[in-house]
Amino acid sequence: MFFIEREMRGRRYRLAVESIWDSATQRSVPRQVILGPADPSCIVDLADTEHVGDMRLGDTGALAWVVEQLDVVGMIDRICHETSCAGDVSLGEMVVAVAMQRACAPGPKCGLADFLGSSLPRACCLPAKLFTGQAFHRLASRVEADQLDKVQVELAKAIVQRFGLSTSVLAYDTTNFDTYIDTTTPGELARRGHAKSKRNDLRVVGLGVLASETGHVPLLFRAYPGNASDQAVLGECLDGLGRLHDALDEGEGRKRSAHRTVVRDGGFWSEQLELELEFVGYHSIISLPMSHKAAQGALESAARPGAMTSLKGDYKDVRAARSRANIGELERTLVVVESKNLLEGQKRGIASALLKARKELRALQKRASQGRISREALELRVKKALGREHLSFFVVTDIGGTDKAPTFRWRVDAKLRRKLETTRLGRRVLCTDRHSWGTERIVHGFRGQWNVEEIFRRQKGGGLVPWGPSYQHADASLRLHTFACVLGVTLVSLVKLQLGAQCSIKSMMQQLADMKVTLVKGRTGKPGRPPTAMIRPRLSPFQAAAAEVFELGRWMPSILSSIHRRQREAVPAGTS
């Protein structure tokens, strides 16, 4: 894309121009869009000036800069070249438009044209009115899942080449999102399953994401049915993981294959999956579930006097115990890590759960004494009441009597509760095949997995680049919508990485969103339609730096003149 000035109807205008190759006609197709007048503003009476609107400059300009650096549109169109016709919106242009909308002003697809029309920077020179919900669904029905997988791998390679991300440790996690699809609507992705939102009346779509250690940039994702096992998803994307491993090596210019590590939260251990990850080139760090036999043995070993020692450096407030054990036929290093924040949170959870359990147990004890409950029903109700927050470990119960006349007694054992707090609560058991790594490096690598959880938190509850609410019905539309949302997270993460912002991503995007161009009309006393003038925004030091980094002067040249003037004014007199 390049910029020119052209005279039309006696006035000069600035235009953005691009040339797209049409493979069907074997010729290039020019596109252009008017950015605004290039002539100096006319002298007007400010009393008669009328404000006619604002246009986005900072947030969309930063995202468009990243899109150009990675050639996202061209990359998608080259891989999915059969999805669009000449003259229509291409798949790459549509996906980038949706990603920018989700990152800057989340809304439905029917509002996509209005969003693009209110933005001065853009990723293509097509009219905004062509970006409709119907066009999105039409493109989604033509793209295959394996094509999107290829795009992810190529995009990860381009990101590593351009932004120099460290990919030695990759964090992996899964979540699911609520949909509003009717039960009778056919589809494979939206299914009723274990919703993370705790709702059981909606169908959900699962999402697994693999992110880099630096910048927390998503490099690979997989949308999967909401009723599928979260842990099995990683095994299903082994082919993609293998291609990603090779692409990252190529992007980093390595002659020998790198040793990369996948970090994932616990809940599932599979010896076969560990072997398959090793086969495609990855090491592993996983938090074992506390019910695992190896985890219980490591906790018992760590409970011995002097077993837990303080770490060094940035983790001097963390205590850990390290050991080796055979899990099945695999030799693994086990690290028991103690976290004060986790301990305090679990203690608060236990206190709240115990308060509810006391009421339930007192009610059951009263019903048992009155003979109003059978022994079988009593056992089920007691098991359910103590099934939360480790209550069954220290709440001692005694159920006796007959089936029709049961007896029930219970008590809270303070000694068992203290033992639970000192030997199990606040602790995680990390399992890895990185035997040569120090304990601090293992803990640091695992804590990077929190960044993927933070991405999911931002995508929920109306946060940054939210996935929902989504009203897509077809599987293809859900898959492409998910791809656009993950791409939006990728673009925002790279903006923060390039800008080197020390603030949060939400604060950064808010400051960029405040960079808007004001459109005004004023009476000149001359015949004809009053001209529209663009007034540049007043920039803070942070915004001025962003304007230079992301080359916003291409879209509004006057914004750079104000920055340079401020820089000259900041230089003391008599200095050069």
Image: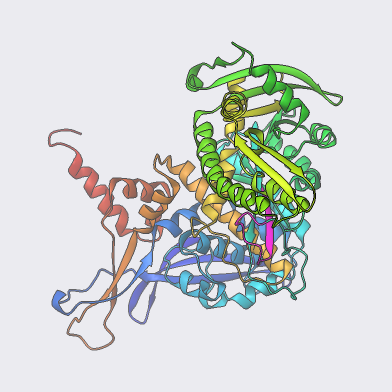
* Percent of width and height locating residue 537: 28, 60
Residue 48 counted in the magenta span: no
Query: Which residue is located at x 70 percent, y 59 percent?
Result: 78
Q: Please state, as top left, top right, bottom left or bottom right, where the C terminus lies in the image.
A: top left
| Residue 118, above or below 319 | below
Query: Which residue is located at x 15 percent, y 74 percent?
Result: 46
Q: Main secondary structure of the magenta part?
A: loop
Q: Is residue 68 visible?
A: no
Q: Which residues are magenta?
A: 195-209
**Horizontal relation, residue 79 to residue 2: left or right:** right
* Percent of width and height locating residue 452: 59, 43
**Horizontal relation, residue 565 to residue 236: left or right:** left
Query: Which residue is located at x 58 percent, y 65 percent?
Result: 19
The picture quadrant where one finds residue 534 is bottom left
Query: Which residue is located at x 67 percent, y 72 percent?
Result: 181
Q: Is residue 269 visible?
A: yes
The picture quadrant where one finds residue 442 is top right
